Image (cartoon, rainbow, N blue to C red):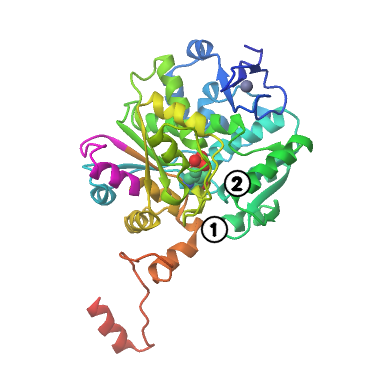
Amino acid sequence: MSELGFELVCLDCETAFSGLEPRYRCDCGGTLDVKHDLKAVAEAVDRDVFDRRRGNGGPLDRSGVWRYRELILPVEARHVVSRGEGNTQLYDSPAVAKYAGLDRLLLKHEGENPTGSFKDRGMTVGTAAARMLGMDRVACASTGNTSASMASYASIAGMRAFVFIPEGNIALGKLSQALAYGARTLQLAGDFDAAMRLVEQVCATESIYLLNSVNPFRIEGQKAIGFELLQDLGWRVPDWIVLPGGNLGNNSAISKGLVELHEIGWIDRLPRIAVIQAGGANPLYTAFTTGRPIEPVRAETIATAIRIGNPVSWKKSLRGIEASNGVVEEVSDQEILDAKAHVDAAGIGAEPASCATVAGLRKLVANGTIDPGSTVCGILTGHLLKDPDVVVGYHSGSLSGIDSRFANAPLRVPDDLDAILAELRRI
Ligand SMILES: *Cc1c(COP(=O)(O)O)cnc(C)c1O
Ligand SMILES: [Zn+2]
């Protein structure tokens, strides 16, 4: 172990690197894990320390990522750019539970992060790593939320940001954020997978730091979703954690963090992880059900945040699913939008990809994989307002190929009191 207190280890060949140079992959092409000295962590802190920090006002303790810093990344405080990420609500929603077929459902809303998605948890750590390494330019390929988050954190850190986004198929709220926060935005004539391939090549030669989730430090930050969820539950382990999968960094992160907690002995068992993919972007589902390595697909789904055909973190993802005896499920766009109508109407609201969580849950309960009486936590990954076009399109019945079964269409009325009163009595 290096004097930094962590090292980077290749998932494929186990070569270790010091973590003192910008590096996203091993020379063999394998992705990298941050490996902590867990014994030293267990000697330095315990769950009570994290609980005490939660009630504290200090800038690092207030962050729902840096509160767990010993398990995230041991960096100097001066390198940290924080917007007080995390601290998201855990909703107990009887309405959504009923729709999913569960007795009870807890929904952790990661759309309540500063830029409206869980990406902020990874980005605060990725930005700190960039500072630690002395990099002042950052880049990512993005279906939208990564670029929104990176643009914000880079601006605060005084770094130049370059985002590569696929032309079309990016939700309006997300594109607005990247432009507004001042990132140089390259709209590529190609899909996300093409953008991802190109940005990795650019960062390899241009001394620009890559902040996609292939960056192992992003994963460390996103582990905090699981830490905070357990803290929300008084460290009682739920039976299931359910979340959508696109590039597969997030489920890899949550599993990695929980496995580490288990290794330290702070939890006595692992929750089972269920990863939900869109049917039109389902390479993990296929790999999981056939037992074969990932085969890239041309991705198509209305849930743009998970419209990814060649996911970078598939090996990490399968490792975590295996460790937790987890499952992978797929859902159609119709199922995603029906679930979204219920999540939204429950007063909680989330973007389409997030609602794959609830659509998948409903399927897993119906097919007997998840017992209706089990403790289930679903992760809502992004904010309702990220994708207003889909919301308005759904409720006005104008999405092609989608049956707007639960539409709440606006009513047209004349500017006449009697007509309005008649309408109000009717609805
Ligand atoms: C990024 C993102 C996902 C997918 O997460 P991965 O780590 O790529 O699997 C899901 N939902 C939302 C809202 C996202 O922004
Ligand atoms: Zn290797």
Residue that carries the numbered disc 2 in the rendered image: 193
Q: Is residue 8 left or right of residue 329?
A: right
Q: What is the three-letter code of the residue carrying label 1?
A: Ala
Q: Quadrant of the N terminus?
A: top right
What residue is rendered at 60% in x and 52% in y?
Answer: 191
Asked whether the viewer can see residue 112, the reply is no
Q: Under 8 Å from ligand 1: the CB of mark 2?
A: no
Q: Is residue 316 left or right of residue 154?
A: left
Label number found at residue 408: none
Whether residue 368 appears in magenta in the rendering, the answer is: yes
Q: Position of residue 54 (x, y in %)?
A: 45, 30
Point out the frontmost of discs 1 and 2.
2
SS type, badge 2: helix
Q: Quadrant of the C terminus?
A: bottom left
Residue farthest to the right, as pictured: 206
For the residue carrying disc 1, how many other residues have a C-alpha within 10 Å: few (<14), some (14-19), or many (20+)? many
Residue that carries the numbered disc 1 in the rendered image: 171
Viewer-proximal residue among 103 and 200 = 200
Whether residue 143 appears in magenta in the rendering, the answer is: no
Q: Position of residue 10 (x, y in %)?
A: 60, 22
Instruction: Magenta stretch: give its range.
Output: 359-376
Q: Is residue 287 above or below residue 409?
A: above
What residue is rendered at 31% in x and 30% in y?
Answer: 238
For the residue carrying disc 2, how many other residues have a C-alpha within 10 Å: few (<14), some (14-19), or many (20+)? many
Q: Is residue 252 left or right of residue 164?
A: left
Among the two numbered marks 1 and 2 on one chain, the one whose residue lies closer to the N terminus: 1
Q: Position of residue 128 (x, y in %)?
A: 65, 32
Q: Position of residue 227 (x, y in %)?
A: 44, 29
Could you say which quadrant of the image residue 123 lies in? top right
Asked whether the viewer can see residue 163, the reply is yes
Spatial CA distance of label 1 from label 2 is 17 Å
Q: Is residue 165 above or below residue 313?
A: below
